[in-house]
Image (spheres, helix red, strand yellow):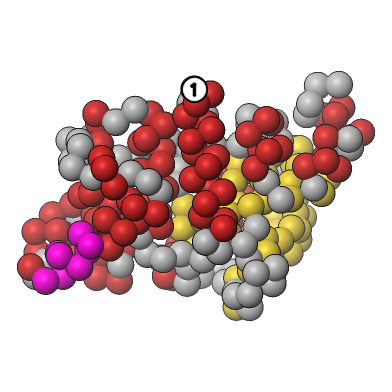
Amino acid sequence: PAKGSPLLQVEQISKRFGGLVAVNDVSFGVKAGEIVGLIGPNGAGKSTTFNLVTGLLHASGGSVTFNTENITGLHSRAIATRGIARTFQHVKLLPSMSALENVALGAHLRSEQGFVRNTVNAMLHLERKEEQELLNEAARALTRVGLQHLMHEQAGNLALGQQRILEIARALCCDPLLLLLDEPAAGLRHLEKQALSKVLQELRESGMSILLVEHDMEFVMQLTDHIVVMEFGAKIAEGTPEQIQQHPAVIEAYLGG
Ligand code: ADP
Ligand code: MG
């Protein structure tokens, strides 16, 4: 998709859990080559929105269009193979495996074959040549995020900031068009946040599109092109970082006056 063309379009999406409306009639878009921030207080419906986009949850109403295709109701695997990759709110690495193996395994589990077997032992059943291709692809993903020098380190020995970037490398391994990152900067120190921000800016420059949930306002404001604000399941504002910082409803609801 050409830079600036619509990539993801969420239209009037809703999700009810029994009597609770976790996401209420929310619409927003991500254009190709853009970083969009999804912000709002705890319980606002941000992670649920991610789960609706990636197919982990099925919407009670509304639609999701990706790369001109209606993907509403597709299974999460089908959505992943169309080019949407994600990381989760909590690190899910295998600490005793190397950085390279973590990325290669993640890529394999997301490949068509991996989905069929879906086991950590899957790597053992690979042909030598397939394994080498996976490792090459993993090395390329690590290079893209600047972690190539750490590829043989055990994932568990890396600093938290490096582990977060490693998770992003793992998500990059199927050549996605859109990355969804759930609180990538949470718990990181200032310098680690800066390093993460630089990686995400470089990905954007290479054409990647990113949707991220994040609580650190400084991080969101300096990184994103567009911000969507949710509260109590509904979208209460959207705009550029400058517009959002001056938006009365946002200041009241979220930035604490
Ligand atoms: P956020 O990520 O913005 O903090 P969530 O999307 O996790 O918010 O949650 C939105 C609301 O939906 C919350 O009130 C939460 O308790 C509720 N919720 C989330 N997932 C479920 C679920 N699987 N079952 C029932 N309620 C849920
Ligand atoms: Mg959340």
Label 1 element class: loop
Q: Residue at x 25, y 31 (%)?
A: 156
Q: Label 1 sits on what residue type?
A: Arg
Image side of residue 70 versus residue 110, left or right: right
Residue positioned 60% across, 75% down in the render: 1
Let me know if residue 101 appears in the view: yes
Label 1: how many Cα within 10 Å (few below 14, some 14–19, many 20+): few
Taking the image as shown, residue 185 lies to the left or right of residue 175, namely right
The answer to whether 179 is drawn above or below residue 167 in the figure is below
Task: Say which of 229 and 167 sits in front.
Answer: 167
Task: Provide the residue designation for mark 1.
Answer: 189
Secondary structure that dominates the magenta span: helix
Who is closer to the viewer here, 183 or 152? Answer: 152
User: Where is the C terminus found, in terms of image quarters?
Assistant: top right
Q: Measuring from the top left, give residue 187's x and y in whole percent.
A: 49, 24
Percent position of residue 212, x then y = 59, 46
Q: In which quarter of the image is residue 104?
A: bottom left
Q: In this view, does 116 lie to the left or right of 146?
A: left
**Vertical placement of 55 versus 91: above or below?**
below
Q: Does the magenta stretch include residue 124?
A: no
Magenta residues, start to end: 129-136
Q: Can residue 8 be seen in this view?
A: no
The residue at 63%/66% (across/down) is: 32
Outermost residue on the right side: it is 248
In the image, the residue with mark 1 has its CB under 8 Å from the nearest atom of ligand 2: no
Q: In this view, does 21 lie to the left or right of 243?
A: left
